[in-house]
Amino acid sequence: MNTPTLASANMPFFQKMIFGDHGASEAAAWSDGLFMMITWFSAFFFVLLMGLMVAFVIIYRRRPGVPAKPSPSHNLNIEILWTVIPSASMLVMFVLGVRGYAMKMVAPDAAMELKVDAWKWAWKVTYPNGASSPETNFLSFESNMAQLEAGSTDPWMETKGLEYPVFYVPEDTAVSLRMNSQDVIHSFWIPEFRTKMDVIPNRYTGYAFHTPKLRDSDSVLDTSSMMQIPGRDMWIFCAEYCGDEHSRMAATLRVVPQETYDAKIKEWGQDKDPVVLGESLYKTMCKICHSVDGTPGTGPTWSSGNGFGFGYEAALANGQSVMRDDNYYRESILDPNAKVVSGFVPSMPAFQGQLSEDEIHGLIMYIQSLSDRNPNASESGEDNQQADDSAGSEG
Amino acid sequence: MQTTLDADTTPAPAHIANHPTHWRNRPFAAHFRTRDDDFDASKFGMWLFLTTEVLLFAGIFCAYAVFRMMYPEAWSNGSHHLDWRFGAGNTVVLLVSSWTAASAVRCAQLNKQKWLKINLIITLICAALFLFIKFKFEYSVKLGDGKAPGTFFSYAFAESPYEILWWSLYYMGTGLHALHVVIGGCLLGWVLYRSWKYQAYGPTEYLMVENSALYWHIVDLIWIFLFPLLYLIH
Amino acid sequence: MSSTDHAHHEGESYFDGPPGVLSKVWQWMSTVDHKKIGVMYLVAVLFMFFLGGVSALAVRYELLDPVRTVETMNEAGEMIQYTTGERLAGLTNIMGAKNANEVYNRIFTLHGAIMVFMFIIPSIPASLGNFFLPIMLGAKDVAFPRLNLLSWYIYVIGCLFGVFSILLGGVDTGWTFYTPYSTTTDADHWRVVLMILAAFILGFSSILTGMNFVVTVHKLRAPGMGWFDMPLFIWGVYATAIIQVLATPVVGITLLLLVFERVMHIGIFDPSMGGDPVLYQHFFWFYSHPVVYVMILPGMGIVSELLAVHSRKHIFGYRAIAFSSLGIAAVSFLVWGHHIFTAMGELAAVLFSGLTFLVAIPTAIKVFNWIATLYKGSIAINTPMLYGLIFLFTFSIGGLTGLPLATLATDLHLHDTYYVVAHFHYTMMGGTVMAFMGGLHHWWPKMFGKMYSEKGAMTGTVLVFIGFNLTFFTQFFLGTQGMPRRYANYVDEFQTLHMISTYGSWILLLGFLVHLGTFIVSLIAGDKAPPNPWGGLTLEWETESPPIEHNFHHEPIVTHGPYDFDKVVPPHWDPKDYPLPENPSSH
Ligand code: HEA
Ligand code: HEA
Ligand code: CUA
Ligand SMILES: [Cu+2]
């Protein structure tokens, strides 16, 4: 149950075929109902018209020597009829549509507000206590576990994709979103709530939803404790085209009992070992472009070797080179286009204003820990020395 | 008023009297039934085209209105940087030229060849004057101050970060308009050339004069909107 | 439709030219004859359709399966990692892209941009419209023949800009060029600017064609042809031309601002400078919504002709259809906001939703009228008619699925999903392209003087119909279930539907290849077409097939309506060749 699913049981056949699942909130169920109503209405007219068309084609098919029979060229009554009926029904659709829209947009006063930030290409949710979620989740983790449990080892095959951040919300709670983008336009879509809104730079947008009550069968794998806990996962997709990794700008929304939620955000709100903090930030925010195992990506890898990594000289696109030290990293994170590494397109978003001092520190500590010239690692004192030397010789 | 001067109604000099481009000898397009149809069609086409011109500028005006609402101070600062006297001067220049352009049409209809040319020349001088004022006293001074569009903006005393948007719109609007002045000037210059060389326009053949003049009126009209929006409203 | 003489003349057909290849080429390239220009447009737009189709096939090919990173053990027991499902990855270096995703993004952008700007907008009006509008009006040419040629050249130059941009690697902005993505992507390249300029230039071509048609309809109708004696195809093209003239300049200035935004950051649409990216969307859709009716109105015009002629019936509610074209043209300017419900304020959203429903009413009226036209007809089942019926089927689905999109509550879910993709393919492909194919078959004998093989054409038609529905009906389900559009990669559970869709696109390809083959065979070895193979009553059937140089031997005078099949014997009708049911008056 670790991957979000869009499918579940017992609902009308066509609705199941169309949506795959119940909407997860009252507003969602309501708009599904409206959709089905419009669809049945359309189907009625479609079948009626196509039925007539086929019938006419068969009945009045051409027979040589038989002319078309005379028939009226217009008929005011019937024309009024087929203008008024569609108009009236569309008026109904319009009104109901506005009502459903209000249900999705307007947040109750008591709603819990989450801050959503977006950039190319990740989501970050900040909880009311200022913490953000460090947990991630593998796309195809489940199938791997299943295979392991089933004891299938030959060939031992694991499919994995990116790790997506997991955002927690308590069950049966009104939530409102306050969203803003750092770069281009994105769109925060939770299919199971049947609603989305564009996330635009330089302005706040938002919407609201009411999380469902958990069903007895709802359980998910908690990756921090590796235990099944009550909860329900849903996909979050980016629905506005935003570039290369638009199709992987996903995340998981996890509805959990209030206690679990409280415990989690309390834990995240506390101070942490900088390296651990850095690593969790890395997974949720940087991993889409930077690897830590030397493989190339949209951005340079953070591990050392091949001229990358902390303590090694960076060749810049403008022909100069610069030593990768704390200050260089700080600048690279806050204002990435100030010094562009040669061979890369300057496509990294600026994280100025996005990260707290602790977080920047954590990231730099984490990056350092990946290098064989890590100044903090006790056993690599020599490497450290070396790094200082080369820095000195440069200056 | 010009009747006394009219040596103009005299027939064309012999060497162009039978020239196919002389106004008396010009045929109309063969797929029309009558010369009137041809004429009406072309004029109608021109009106449609002018509609598209107005709509083209409508985009600029919309953007102007939107940002004016968003950043009223920037807009007010921006327009304070413009000297209304140059704007007003150019407005007068364009109004005069519009009047002479209209007179040129009238002269062609009355076969006053000499006054046709004089009117056209005045119009062209006005066009040049307009561009001169625009470039010499406005653009080059402002560009010198660093009040340039987009990346080139380097004016150090801007009071609002959004003034740069004002300047962008200013240059887009007036630049596009200046381009239209140039195009209109070319059209009128062509008309002048042909009437000089062939007496190509006269009572039965003044379509090109009329259409060019119409174009010129639109150029004028657009300025009449740009001027108060940019220079007068603070 | 007129009282011209009915004798056959041995006139020169419009494409008989001087001998010699070079002089022939020159004759075509410098022609001001609307028929030749129409044919030149036809060739050009079909070529663009082909290019757009090829990129569509590439899009579908990539989507056969989702991308997976697979980790497995090889024989030696080592862990190895590889990626499956990046089917276009091979193009990465060729296109100079950063990765396989970018390849995909560029390809769907090219697909959209080519299909919209270079194929579908000019398709029917500029090819069939150019060829038949003057003839159906009884005129010798369009009002401004030289301007007409100029439009064609501008069109070609625009296409060359686009193709050049593609050769440089293509763009990955989406056909909508939304800022700030479009102004920041590939910042150091000219490709994006070239593509935007292509759209800008094509706009000019579109404006000039539109102007030309409006004036032609006003000034060049044959003596005796009042507004309500015009064939409905003309009404459709006329309404289209009005939209083209009024909407295109706005996108012109928008694209121009976009170009300046890219090359010198004027900031109007750039949020980091205080500009407004949503303003761009408003500007863009102010043009691009009306433009969807530029696409469909000429198609609707064709369908009116097809249904009337091939069932030998006067159109039911002629005036209602004519006026609804104008109604659609007028209302289409008020509904652009429905594309950006998720980016605008509540009040505006409600307003635009309401207005959107208004535009559906005239369309619904048309559909009802068309079905009523079939009643008591004498319905021939041939390729043009079949396409007419297919249009009714697929376009109705396309239009009806526009209703949940216009409804606010449901659009919040469906926006930017495959539901929208399916909707617009059902309207553009299922509407315009089907009508275009129908019109092409209907007028093929007239344009080229050759009959085509009915068997071949029918085979193609059936394949296209099946392939089309397989490809796109599945996408409605994808969309409602949560598949966003413009995704190079997707969640596993969508794979089955995506696979069906891709297989459908192969059948589509097959169908179009059969059509292409049929047309080529017809040109080479087709029977000579009689002047009036279908027994039509509009003026184009009164001249030779193919038409002579100035269309008619004598100026036609209109004495009856375009669809008076029950009153008039079709001119030039030779029952020996093409038996039609007899008309009452022919006894
Ligand atoms: C030929 C092109 C064409 C046509 C004709 C239409 C026709 C319509 N379109 Fe469509 N549309 C597009 C092309 C077209 N569209 C494109 C290209 C896009 C996406 C662009 C992009 O984002 O890339 C789009 C997107 C789009 C959206 C935005 C979706 C989103 O992004 O969230 C909406 C929303 O309102 C919409 C609505 C409609 C409506 C209400 C009609 C109406 O005009 C339809 C009217 C027709 C009918 C109603 C059916 C026929 C009638 C009957 C069978 C009779 C019975 C009917 C009744 C009783 C009602 N369209
Ligand atoms: C006219 C408009 C048009 C047409 C006809 C088509 C036709 C097709 N389209 Fe496309 N499509 C768009 C306009 C169109 N499209 C637009 C605007 C977008 C949005 C882009 C964006 O998001 O920016 C889009 C997006 C789009 C997507 C979504 C991509 C995404 O969001 O990730 C997909 C996916 O399946 C797709 C598929 C197809 C397919 C399989 C066809 C097939 O029907 C194609 C079949 C055609 C052929 C196979 C060519 C065969 C031709 C010949 C052999 C020669 C012709 C000769 C004669 C006819 C005589 N299209
Ligand atoms: Cu972010 Cu798409
Ligand atoms: Cu629309």
Image (spheres, coloured by chain):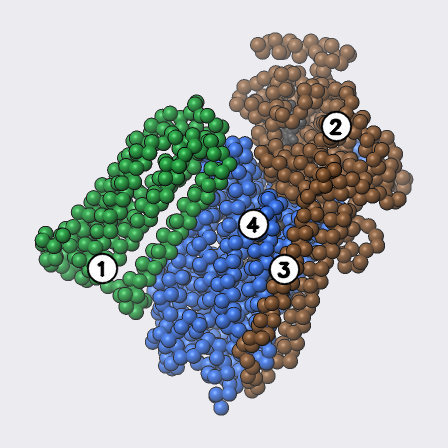
Chain colours: A brown, B green, C blue
Residue with the mark numbered 3: A91
Q: Quadrant of the C terminus of chain A?
A: top right
Q: Which residue is mark 1?
A: B205
Give me the C-alpha separation between circle 1 and circle 2. Answer: 81 Å
Three-letter code, disc 1:
Glu
Callout 2: chain: A
Return the residue at label 4.
C337
Mark 1 and mark 3: Cα distance apart in space: 56 Å
Disc 3 vs disc 2: which is toward the camera? 3
The residue at the point 55 percent across, 75 percent down is A76
Residue C63, given in percent of the width and then of the height, sits at: 68, 48
Q: Residues within 10 Å of mark 1 (few under 14, many from 20)?
A: many
Q: Residue at x 74, y 56 (%)?
A: A33
| Marks 4 & 1 on one chain | no
Q: Residues within 10 Å of mark 2 (few under 14, many from 20)?
A: few
Secondary structure type for disc 1: loop
**Viewer-proximal residue, A258 or C173?**
A258
As drawn, C207 above or below C90? below
x%, y% of residue A226? 86, 32
C-alpha gap between disc 3 and disc 4: 18 Å
Q: Nearer the viewer, residue A187 or C263?
A: A187
Identify the secondary structure beneath mark 4: helix
| Location of residue B61 (image quadrant) | top left
Query: Closer to us: mark 4 or mark 1?
Result: 4
- Numbered label attached to residue C12: none
| Mark 3, other Cα within 10 Å: few <14 / some 14–19 / many ≥20 | some
Q: Mark 2 sits on what residue?
A: A129
Tell me if the residue at label 3 has its CB under 8 Å from ligand 1: no
Q: Secondary structure at mark 2?
A: loop
